[in-house]
Image (spheres, rainbow, N blue to C red):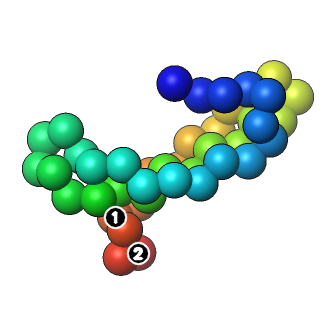
């Protein structure tokens, strides 16, 4: 779930398939959401 009240979010979550950590970076700009997902070591 994306919190649109925060302009930038950066957090780590475990992948539901392989259980490896994934870094999620979320930006909210003018009502649009942009999500980038990377392996934790990238």
Q: Are marks 1 and 2 in contact (CB under 8 Å)?
A: yes
Assess disc 1: are there few (<14), some (14-19) or many (≥20) residues with their C-alpha within 10 Å of its C-alpha: some
24 or 30: nearer the eye?
24
- The quarter of the picture where the C terminus appears is bottom left
Q: Is residue 9 left or right of residue 40?
A: right
Examine the rendered structure and indicate whether residue 7 appears above or below residue 19: above
Examine the rendered structure and indicate whether residue 24 appears above or below residue 21: above
Examine the rendered structure and indicate whether residue 37 appears above or below residue 6: below
- Asked if residue 21 shows in the view, the reply is yes
Residue 11, horizontal then vertical, whole percent: 51, 53
Residue 5, horizontal then vertical, whole percent: 79, 28
Q: Is residue 11 left or right of residue 7?
A: left
Q: Residue at x 77, y 37 (%)?
A: 6
Q: Quadrant of residue 30?
A: top right
Q: Quadrant of residue 33?
A: top right
Assess disc 2: are there few (<14), some (14-19) or many (≥20) residues with their C-alpha within 10 Å of its C-alpha: few
Q: Residue at x 43, y 55 (%)?
A: 12
10 or 39: nearer the eye?
10
Residue 20, horizontal then vertical, whole percent: 20, 58
Q: Is residue 21 left or right of residue 19?
A: right
The residue lying furthest to the bottom in this view is 41
- Asked if residue 32 shows in the view, the reply is no
In the drawing, what numbered circle is on residue 23? none
Q: Which residue is mark 2?
A: 42
35 or 40: nearer the eye?
40
Q: Which residue is mark 1?
A: 39
The residue lying furthest to the left in this view is 18
Q: Helix or strand or loop: what does disc 1 sit on?
A: strand
Q: Helix or strand or loop: what does disc 2 sit on?
A: loop
Marks 1/2: CA–CA distance: 6 Å
């Amino acid at each position: 779930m994306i919190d649109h009240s925060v302009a930038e979010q950066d957090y780590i979550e475990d992948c539901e398939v392989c259980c490896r950590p994934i870094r999620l970076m979320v930006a909210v700009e003018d009502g649009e959401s942009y999500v980038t997902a990377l392996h934790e070591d990238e």
